[in-house]
Amino acid sequence: MNRTLFSIALLLVPVYAVSGMASARDTQPASAASSATPLAPVTVRSPSAPRQGGIANLDGASLKDTPVSITIMSRRELDLRQPRTISDLASYDASMGDDYAPVGYYQDTTIRGYILDLATGFRINDLTVVGAQRFAFENVQRVEVLKGLAGIDAGVIAPAGVIDFITKRPADVHSLTFGTDSHGSRYAAADIGTWLTPDFGIRLNTAWEGIHSYVEHANGRRNFYALAADWKIGERAVLRLDSSYQTSAQRSVSGYQLLGGTTVPAHASRTQMLGYEPWQLPVIMGTSNTSARLDLALSKHWKLRLDAGHSRSVINDNVAYAYGCFYTAACASGATPGNFFAPNGEYDIYDYRSPDDTRANDEIKAIVNGQFDTGFLHHTVSLGADFFRRIVHQRPYVYDYVGSANISQRNPPYYPPSPNQPGPPARRLDSWQRALMAQDRIRFGGHWQGVVGARFVRLDESAFDDRGLLQRHTRLHRALPQAALLWMPDAAITGYLSYSESLSLGAEAPWWASNGGTILAPLLSRQTELGARYDSDGGPQLSLAVFRIRRPDQYAMPDASPAGYTFVQRGQNVHQGIELGAHGPLGADLRLDASVAWLRTRAEGIGTPAYEGHQLVNTPAWRTSVFAEYRLPVFPALSLLGGWRYSSEKNALPDGLTRVGAYNVFDTGLVYRTRPGGHTITWRLIVNNVFNRFYWRDTGTAYGDAFLFPGAPRLARLTVTVDL
């Protein structure tokens, strides 16, 4: 019996044991059942229920009244596809893609071709959290992806958008999930909730995972705990509390680089750990996210919302890092750029250690909403204040060359680690954002709405060197406006035209540029979007968005400096695109989640003609994502799953001369539900990349350097959920 079958056999033992316990509970005497404490009624909303949120609208308006493009990934979709990482999540929507998303490390993504800001682009329950963490999905009810400029409630943020994880609320839930995959991973999770009184409920989510990676030497583990509580305080107030903690440990996998700075590796391996040395420790992360929200009805037409959150991630970063070819004979002449692999596949190995990398976010937000009429106009006015602090503490890291290897070597030669040790902890960043927000939603004419608002932001940010000495101080004030016009001819259709502005921080120049380490000025982004949304009862949700985003371009400009490059802001970075989406049931037995995105990205007027006139790095012109669930009418307990992902070619260099090929990836699976003893057992099997296609999923950059990450090989993942 192989390892995978043995793992499945072990998992079935607790499944059947739990099933027997559930059946026994059903056969208890009636007297025992009658002594049970009645639970409070619970309202369960379907995935198509109107969204109430705060990212795009200060007044928490429904998705129908939101004049931006938002994709909602429901709990149902998460259960079917079983994501474990941000890279898994990026395959759900055609507007998303990977960007520096190594196996075993925290990951980033792109939306509409822009890189999501790790500092401010991720949220839990509308509060900003540290993006440098491995996000868990066990306590998530739905994931909301706001694409493009994120409105006046987002603050200083990159124009990619926001990913918001909305957590599960208390309910009468008692379920256990066990899982494995075709590499032998082991997984167990519990979802337990109840209403202790009619006004107070809790929900506990826990998970344990033993990760058997498809990359050699990259096995790991993960433990997760989350608690949510809702308390109805009288008739006018509701308090919601959330707290989660996760630890993980897994070796980080280095990416490939272009050979000689121009050639895509022809025989790359998806399962090889580049630069592997046996002394390489796993990357250990400990993350906590805590939030509280109070909703208070001040009167019939006025309400107050108070939010407070704390997010903290501590990373012990360790890697035998495969990077560049500065110390190889093939690059000794200087003809080949040292920050790429050598033409013959040689690369350098560095001992990189950065322990106690600590990042923390704290946010307090208050919003008052009220309604009143002025003549034939109905106003929903929102006024708010937002205080956000972000700090980073790091120790001077070890980053020492230890030896060189070749990509053709399955395991590199052994090199001893560096004897050097990291320095003492030092404050590296202290950033404050203080903001006032105002918005007025005006309804008129029966079918029209206008939304006008602005965010008045003050940024005060200090950066320090590894000794704690001030390197940079940024202080700015800015008003960021937003305006939209919505037309709703009937209850199912919404059309909108919107304009918004946002501010994002300038990037840091890569170390190999003449001004390496310099952080450039903040950037103002502008977005115009035209969209339409159709949402009928019982049918699919259809969406269309046409957008244009422009922002000053920042890049390493080739010049005559001794380094050969200077990092500058010049010209414009322009992204234009069309997005189509269809989500929901198509008849009684078929459900579809599909999206198509066309994206045109250009650098305009930047002063380097070779970098203009073609797609920017890591942005395919076309992407599709299709996933369907079909319940067999003759056997309703069984549903078939099928998926298709497509990406057109992607450029790997700014000059557009090197690119990776297009790819099609197909997924399949099934869901089987039984009810022994009146308790549901759900089997879910998903097989990703069923034809085992090799493809490059990521050609993004990190700290100015370009990397290539291959997509995962065929992977089958099985879970069994028992509802007690």
Image (spheres, rainbow, N blue to C red):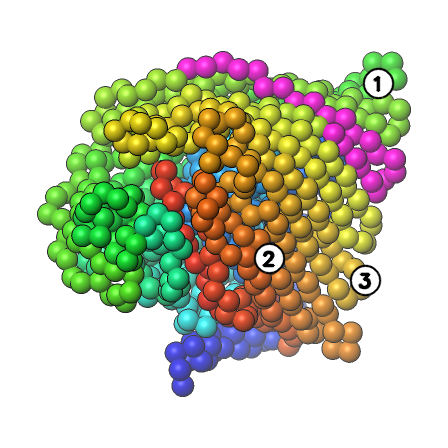
The mark nearer the N terminus, 1 or 3, is 1
Say which residue appears at 68% left-offset and 71% top-offset: 639
Q: What element carries label 2?
A: strand
Distance in Å between CA atoms under marks 3 and 2: 26 Å
Q: Looking at the picture, tell me which residue is in the foreground, 189 or 104.
A: 104
**Quarter the N terminus occupies:** bottom left
Q: Are marks 2 and 1 in contact (CB under 8 Å)?
A: no
The answer to whether residue 342 shows anywhere in this view is yes
> In the visual, does 363 lie left or right of 626?
left
The answer to whether residue 304 shows anywhere in this view is no
Distance in Å between CA atoms under marks 2 and 1: 47 Å
Tell me the magenta residue range. 475-497
Task: Tell me the kind of residue under disc 3.
Answer: Gly
> In the visual, does 116 lie left or right of 63?
left
The residue under label 2 is: 646
Q: Which mark is in front, 2 or 1?
A: 2
Say which residue appears at 63% left-offset and 36% top-offset: 576
The residue under label 1 is: 377
SS majority, magenta: strand
Estimate how packed mark 3 is, as few (under 14), some (14 to 19) or many (20 or more) residues with alpha carbons within 10 Å.
Answer: few
Image quadrant assignment for residue 314 = top left
Residue 529: where, in percent of width, then height?
69, 32
Residue 472 covered by magenta stretch: no
The residue under label 3 is: 587
Q: What element carries label 3?
A: loop
Residue 82: where, in percent of width, then height?
54, 60
Residue 144: where, in percent of width, then height?
61, 43
Say which residue appears at 46% left-offset and 62% top-offset: 712
Estimate how packed mark 1 is, as few (under 14), some (14 to 19) or many (20 or more) residues with alpha carbons within 10 Å.
Answer: some
Residue 494 covered by magenta stretch: yes
